[in-house]
Image (cartoon, coloured by chain):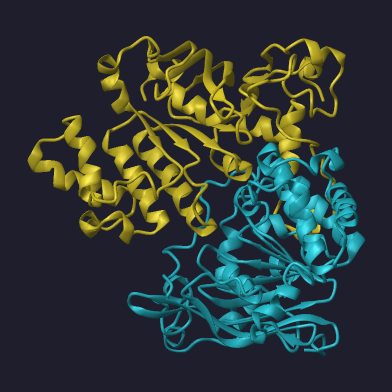
Amino acid sequence: MARKNGQELLLDVRDLAIEVVTRNGPARIVDGISLTVEKGETLGVVGESGCGKSLTMLSLLGLLPNKISVIGGSATFKGRDLLAMSHKELRKVRGGEIGFVFQDPMTSLNPVVRIGQQVMEPLLYHRNMGRAEARKRAGELLKLVGIPGAEERLDNYPHELSGGMRQRVMIAIGLACDPALLIADEPTTALDVTIQAQIVDIVKELRAKLGMSIVWITHDLALIAGLVDRVVVLYAGSVVEDAPVDELYENPAHPYTRGLLASIPRLKDEGAEKLSSIGGTPPEPGRRPAGCPFAPRCPIARAECERAVPALEPVKGEGAHRVACFAAGEIAEAVA
Amino acid sequence: MNAMTKTEPLLQIEGLTKHFHVRLGAFGEREAVVHALDDISFDIMPGETLSVVGESGCGKSTAGFTILQLHRPTAGRIRYQGRDLAGLDEKALRPYRRELQIIFQDPYSTLNPRMTIGEAIAEPILFHKLAPKGEVKSRVERLLADVGLPARFAMRYPHELSGGQRQRVAIARALACEPKFIVCDEAISALDVSIQAQIINLLLELQRKYGLTYLFIAHDLAVVRHISTRVAVMYLGRVAELAPRARLFGNPLHPYTKALLSAVPEADPAYERKRQRQILQGDVPSPMAPPAGCRFHTRCPLAIERCRVEAPVWRETSPGHHVACHLAEGGGE
């Protein structure tokens, strides 16, 4: 593809494979995921629980839990392979050039350390700032993410803040060192809709101001519709579709993506009687079917789908829209 | 439903109030009152789905629990088919407990891990003596079929099931009691999108089949729009607005309802990019010290002096459309 000339790519993950050690032996939970993030691009990574979306991102940061490890692939960030880095090298990247925001602000902030100190930490570590300078910058960062009375808040403990405010603090920490890439893992899932709208608004504003790339991991296709440039859809540890955002919502090519979009009730529609739904449940890690992982739930699966795994290929010609489905061509024709 | 119950509400909730007394501080030296529910009133009609929406801490779950007498109300009445449940003791409540059921949010913690699915579903049947012993097995199989699970699941344990399957079991357990009314307390919120649609369809199908009445507690407005007959919007322990679905979504009167609707994202990139949102500032105040006057005035973009001092009354602006807002006078925009 034309855009993959290596120059503009900030992150290039190729054939990432992750295994977990279980009582019954190793089980593959991420099976050959490839994705890219361009400079200044916002990528949405969508999938249901257990699809490997969080583990993929954690593996880049060297934060995989015990018994889960990367067994193959590469992740090139600014020309260096994150997966091949030593702990020491990775520590320089993490929280510096790559910022991250996790789902649950209740548990990802240290409850016994003041907010200010937690925002200052990356500045002290990565930027070698003095305490006074770091504190001043921490105050600015809290103001940047829209925390009222930012300077006074520096001395608060996390429990003195609401969920939405805590998530803003997390974003401030993620952005502290002007990262080239911000990884946000379901940053609004634990929040109410009005607060979610505030957070999404702030991220959009900061992106325009600071120009960083963002990877936004979510299960919510509606939430990212107005936020991202491109979407990667994961199913059972594999990429099933990768497309520019408008293209994905208008012409979803994979039966899973189509099912997901059809199962979302929409405010604009009048309440239809029956929602279309995807039958069955995703396979458990380690019990992936031999062929296409979606075949057992797929309404249009055929014999070849159960035998071989479809490759991620452009839907037409050399387009940026790629799908891993044997029947995708027929779907496109049927729709057109 | 017969002609008589058609006009009579199944449940009449009048002035329902629930305050929790809590102790604060490291040694519990400070006392405070959480105003979880303050003077809410509405009817629930047989066969309808009344949805209650609002943000965390607005009292929507407390409302469901208090209606079922899982919390005893601080004040107010809950009339079920004319009988006030609030005054009844546990023993007198028992027959009503069978008819008034609940499905909880988290299908991972609501099933006993040591009971098979069959035992879990049989338990209420045996407890309420709803079938002779010999027929329990076939009754369990019928219930499993009702919720779309194969009969062999009766022998399985909860850990062998996925979240969606467990939620089906929780529904079967509620159905086993042959209820008239079910509180669905965020019953689909913990499930994945593709599974949510399955469970919503199942709930609607069962409602038609058994003439069930639902109180559907949720925060997902798109889902609520899909399944509701009427919708109540709660804010900080009070009901801000209640209206038939089409009116609430088509012509919301309360500024909070408008803001809530405006915050819901749509799966449509072009629409989202040009959409003008009305984003509420700030957070919900603490229910331990709710603001005076209208409880929404601290975040309301339209608030005037009167809102700070005088609590708006609960008024009916057009048939079936109730709102508590000084500025929604006359029901106009």
Judge whether residue A313 can be spotted in this image: no
Q: Quadrant of the N terminus of chain B?
A: top left
Left or right: where does residue A128 sit relative to residue A61?
right
- Residue found 85% across the figure and 56% down from its top: A131
Give the image location of residue B231, x and y in percent.
59, 30
Q: Position of residue B265 (x, y in %)?
A: 71, 50
Is residue A262 placed above or below B174 in the rendered structure?
below
Residue in front for this viewpoint, B153 or A110: A110
Q: Is residue B205 visible?
A: yes
Number of disc labels: 0
Seen in the image, is A297 located left or right of residue A145?
left
* Quadrant of the image occupied by residue B52: top right
Give the colour in which the image draws chain B: yellow
Left or right: residue A212 versus residue A71 is right
The C terminus of chain B sits in image quarter: top right
Which residue is at the front of the view, B239 or A155? Answer: A155
Q: Quadrant of residue A92?
A: bottom right
Colour representing chain A: cyan
